[in-house]
Image: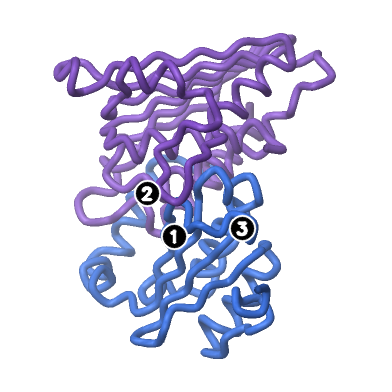
Chain colours: A blue, B purple
Amino acid sequence: MKTLADLAAIRDKMKGKVAIREGSSDTRIVVGMATCGIAAGARPVLNAFVEAVNDAAMTDSVMVTQTGCIGICRLEPVVEVYVGNEPKVTYVKMTPEKAKEVFAKHIKGGAVVTEYTVGSAE
Amino acid sequence: MKELSLNILDIAQNSLRANSTHIEIDLTEDKTSLCFTIRDDGCGMTPEFLSRVTDPFSTTRTTRSVGLGLPFLKMQAEMTGGCFSIESKAKQISPELHGTVVSATFIKTHIDFIPLGNIVDTLCALVMGAGEVDVTFVHRMPEREVSFSTREMREMLGEGIPLSAPEVIAWLREYLLDAYAAA
């Protein structure tokens, strides 16, 4: 049974790490979470990325955030991935399964999963 | 929306974008009905915007001129024989006390009732995106109750650890799953 007291353990474990984290996340995963995204299934996609980052213990280098409507509602759920100085990659029609694959191949492996990108969908 | 909890996430996202400092989500269920209220202290809406807010051709989005969140919710509640209400006080009109309250009641026994679905996923996604905004949640069921408050979480975590940290979200997920399993 988890209790609030467990958060104290998380605090002690994370102390000192967070300051470094804030400036240095060189990878950002941005999930569109407006009505269009949510209705199309963005919530499980977002949670799949958060879990993947946590499971891979990559919380220091990868940040998962949310944004509003990206403007291509028919292709939701839409996910934008920013790695270092590389150009942004936009993934469309995402699912939790595709999210895990993108995490393994692109975030960890550095290889864009071209078949899920907006360029392939258009 | 396939789950009511998705509507809750959608409406709460509006509260986040309204520059609220606190969002309260209150879910009350009995055998035949489910009622939820989302209350924020954000910038509110003017009477003029409020009067047309359930019209799909009203929206705050800038990418195009259609917004479906509130119209969907109203329709889904009314389809079950339930009801929907929204009240709001705009900051420019009422600088002291402002914000928005959205309430919806659903009749659970009606064939058009959409299940609540994965409320834990909704709360994790909401807290992750909440930044400095505080979220209070309570789900009252006939014989039990599940609740949490980000204020309590922040007190335990102390300064400098954001609620959006995946470690914290993982804790929240397990905490809520435990609470629902025990309830």
Mark 1 lies on a secondary structure that is helix
Q: Could you tell me how many numbered marks the image carries? A: 3
Looking at the image, residue B99 lies above or below residue B81: below
Q: Are marks 1 and 3 in contact (CB under 8 Å)?
A: no
| Mark 1 nearby-residue class (10 Å; few <14, some 14–19, many ≥20) | many
Which residue lies at the image location 81% right of the left edge and 14% below the top edge?
B110
Q: CA distance from mark 2 to mark 3?
A: 34 Å
User: Going 65% across and 39% down the picture, which residue do you hit?
Assistant: B118
Chain bearing tag 3 is: A
Kindly check if marks 1 and 2 are in contact, taking CB atoms under 8 A apart as contact. no
Q: Quadrant of residue A92?
A: bottom right
Three-letter code for the amino acid on which mark 2 is drawn: Leu
Marks 2 and 3, the one that precedes in the sequence:
2
Q: Secondary structure at mark 2?
A: helix
Q: Amino acid at mark 1?
A: Pro
**Quarter location, residue B143:** top right
Residue B179: which numbered mark, if any? none
Query: For mark 2, does the 10 Å Cα neighbourhood hold few (<14), some (14 to 19), or many (20 or more) residues?
Result: many
Q: Which residue is mark 2?
A: A7
Q: Residue A43, position in %: x, y?
A: 58, 50
Chain holding disc 1: B
Q: Position of residue B180 (x, y in %)?
A: 62, 33
Identified at 48% across, 41% down, the residue is B65
Pick the front one: B41 or B167: B41
Q: Quadrant of the C terminus of chain B?
A: top right
Residue B22: x percent and y percent?
A: 30, 30
In the picture as drawn, the residue positioned furthest to the left comes out as B95
Give the residue number, with chain letter if any, for mark 3.
Answer: A76
Does B137 appear above or below A77?
above
Three-letter amino acid code at the position of disc 3: Glu
